[in-house]
Amino acid sequence: MDRKIALVACFAFGVVMFAQYFSAHPVAHQVNQAVLEYWQIIFAFALVLGVVGFCQTNVTQVRKGHDRPYRMAALAGFVAMPLLATFWGIKAGSPFLWMFENVQAPMQSTVFALLAFFVASASFRGFRARSVPATILLASALLILLSRTWIPGSMSNWLPDAADWIRNNPSMAARRAILIGIGLGSLTTSLRVIVGIERTWLGGGK
Amino acid sequence: MRLQTRHWVFASLFVLIAVVMASGIRLSVPVSPETQRMYDFIDSLPAGAVVLLSFDHEASSLPEIQPITRALLRHCFEHDLRPVGLALLAEGTAIGYRLMQTTAREYGKEYGIDYAYLGFKPQYVAAILSMGESISATFPQDYLGRPYDSLALLHGVENYDDVAAVLSIADGSFTTHWMEYGGRYGVPVIAGVTAAMVTTYDPYLASGQMQAMVGGLRGAAEYEKLLGRKGGGGARGMLAQSAAHLYVILLIILGNVAYFIKRRRSA
Amino acid sequence: MEIGAVIAGLFTLAILTFLYRDNPVYKMAESLLIGVSIGYVLVITWSSTLVDLLFEPLFAQGALSLTLPLLLGLMMFSRFHHRMSFLSRIPIAVMIGSGAGVAIPAMLEQRTLKQMSATVMPLLTTSGRPDPAAIVILAGVLTTLCYFYFSREHKGMLGVAAKIGTYFLMIFFGTTFGYTVMSRMSTFIGRMEFLLTDFLRLTG
Amino acid sequence: MTSRLLAAVHLCHFIAAIAATVSDPQWFDTARLPTLIAALVAIVIVIYTTYHGSTRDKFTVRRIAGLEAVEEAIGRATEMARPLLYTPGWGGDIQRPTTIASMNILSQVAAKTAQYDCRLVYPTHDPVIMAVAQEVVKSSYLHAGYPDRYRPDDIAYVTSSQFGYAAAVDGMITRLKPASIFLLGTFEAESLILAETGNSVGAIQIAGTDSTIQLAFFIVACDYTLIGEELFAASGYLSGDRSILASVRAQDIMKVIIGLFLIVAGVLATIGALYGMALSGWWGF
């Protein structure tokens, strides 16, 4: 029974949102706006769910003595932010934003910067001219890199042109076909979801 | 732990970049047609037009995003456009506000009259679609907590019809959402993106779904050149960038040499 | 030196130690990052969604229509109770169903139709000469679509076309890789600039 | 059978709703007509392949390399007594069709890990995805006959921040040393961090995404990669579910139509340009 209610809700909201796309009527727009707000609100409640799970896991681990200092650091960071926000607000210049700018942001930037190293190791390890396709992959990557490298002299004129041509023609064609394919895959998946053929998300069961 | 090949790969990259950057040499770059197209597009907008500036990135890509945004904002202010900022990713919020504030100060622009900042809205698809219906309903208040209607430049700005363009500053695929979901309202989309995202957006640029794009540190350096400015973040990193490219090329070649030697030995 | 820059610098270095191996310093930084970032998202979502979109209009302005999303949201909490947890399927159904409804026309129009029409170009120039770019694009799109044809094994004509499609895909992956290397290096260079200029004050 | 009938009734309602919208000129935005027609054509094709008996039953999917490795990856984790890590990436939310496709594959993988008693770890950045994944995995374990092997704590929300998530999953990979890693869903820049770290612990990695630029990294760094649409076909391939296979078939039919469209329009555009005839324009959407 509960599955049926969920399936009906899924179907009804699916049809409404599909139909409103094709309408310019103010009511359609209002419906659209309302449903989109529902998403945001439901997400916010779900976030509480996720956060409670996070706290439970960490508190349990602290009690058991697993990785205690690390678990406590995670909990401390988590508790600090809402506290700072409650007492001093979240506008420019607040301690909350200071934490964001000097603790969270630099660490995230650095995790991101790790990518440079991983790009280097992946280039060393993964780019082998094993087969024709692999060689094509390698050649086009090398061409693009060279074309965007500062090289004095005549090379610097035709290389970027060749690279741009590759990028704007064969490369773009492949991406276009990937996009078309993904569009079709998304379309049929969504359709199956709306009419209730696809119900894995409900926890399986036919 | 024994040092592995990848540790050497990592260490060499670190040393190389540190040395090149410490040398302090700056390179000048030729302007690509793409960057020129963005410059011309912004130049073609009438003075006073409102441009929505969406900070669709996280704090992590700041090194690349900041020079691009600075250059584009400078052009907007020089040209008397009125940028209105917002963020679709929570982390872009504070960064966007600070970038707009500091750049506006350079030109003596005033908050609420020459520029404004609406703040962050989660659930990006919802936010984009919802602004197509009503921006004031989506953002009843600006970032600083003032009512939408109290800001002079937002008077008469109801939805995308009253906006000259959406400039999406992105380090990921968020600009796609602007085109895919904002596209239905017919608002022109332009973008400042990290170099990694350039090929992703090429088809959109070619199909006209996106009007113009500036990509990467290199794009920023070119834009700075068009604005006649020196010493922005763009030009500074160009030599290090080239060195890094040559390093990766070298790694690919070395990797292949090692591979073929090994294959010959085993054969 | 500004305290913020020192702290930011130390955390930057702590994360970089991961390149050598997993270690207590990285683990500590990682844990703190996870905690702080959850706290940040929670605060921002609270203020920009729950307060702005729900509590303010519902309780302060009496927008009763918002009781429905409030109920839907509260249903998510039924997951805390084993026997009531089926209720959480309803808000999830609303999100998945409406998401699918939005996705069908949006994906179809923007990903498929727009990309199709952009591919249609005259294959010859006005002087009657073949236009290499237009031909390459058409051939690329068609052969790559052949690669994505699942109903038949890739043999015979289809096999040849799909193989050419693979080559186009590889060109795309190579190009993308090249551009992404640029981007990733820029990020690292930016981080180095911070370390050298703001943290260590070696360059100016 | 009942569910199929019910689905058919749903479909009829769906089409009736569309017809009602279109019939009222006030309500219909004519600029959207081409998209509506295309959507209707697509819907009809899906209905045909789903409900037309012989089309449905005869159809098989071509070999997809990455998918043949799924069983091997799970077996390897079991043999080595190490966990299996599955993540849908940072880029998606539950409304995204890719996430749904990934859930489908997750349910297949979970059924096998339940059977082999192999630990399945699923970190995610989205609390709604977490809730759905818990349902999916729980029911897979239940259907496989091992409800007691299900560990809800392993299907966890880590954080919504992109690189917070990347750091957390990286930490998990280095500490748990999973034998196999599945990266299936929508990924952004975190893709290579995860794939390279996975490689450094010697995991066998199966990736698949609709994020085109991340594909380049997965191709270079992972053992098997599902490219774009292959991810959508994968769930049908793994489960052998007729209804999913039918929609894969529908996608193929649409691809043939698109191919023909491109060729015909291309020829007409060429003739139009050469002889200055007004043949062009009708293909602009």
Image: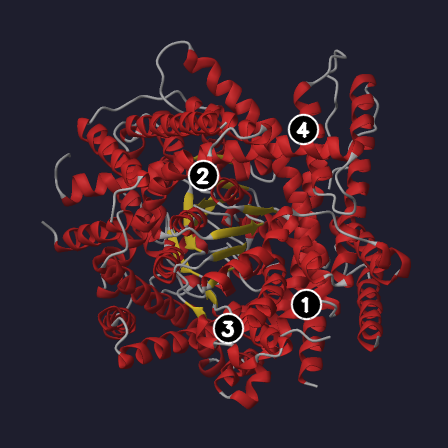
Q: Nearer the viewer, residue A114 or A175?
A: A114
Q: Answer few, some or many: residues within 10 Å of disc 1's Cα (few below 14, many 20 plus, some between 14 and 19).
A: few
Q: In the image, is D57 to the left or to the right of B46?
A: right
- Of D116 and D56, nearer the camera is D116
Letter of the chain that mark 3 sits on in the rendering: A
Foreground mark, 2 or 3? 2
| Lower position in the chain sequence, tag 3 or tag 1 | 1
Which residue in the structure is indicated by mark 3?
A41
Residue B42 appears anywhere in the view: no
Q: Position of residue D223 (x, y in %)?
A: 52, 46
* Foreground of the two, D88 or C190: D88
Q: Residues within 10 Å of mark 2 (few under 14, many from 20)?
A: many
- Disc 4 residue type? Ile
At x 48%, y 23%, the residue is A143
Residue D263 sits above or below residue C93 on the image: above
User: What's under tag 1, amino acid-wise?
Assistant: Val
Residue at image mark 4: C137
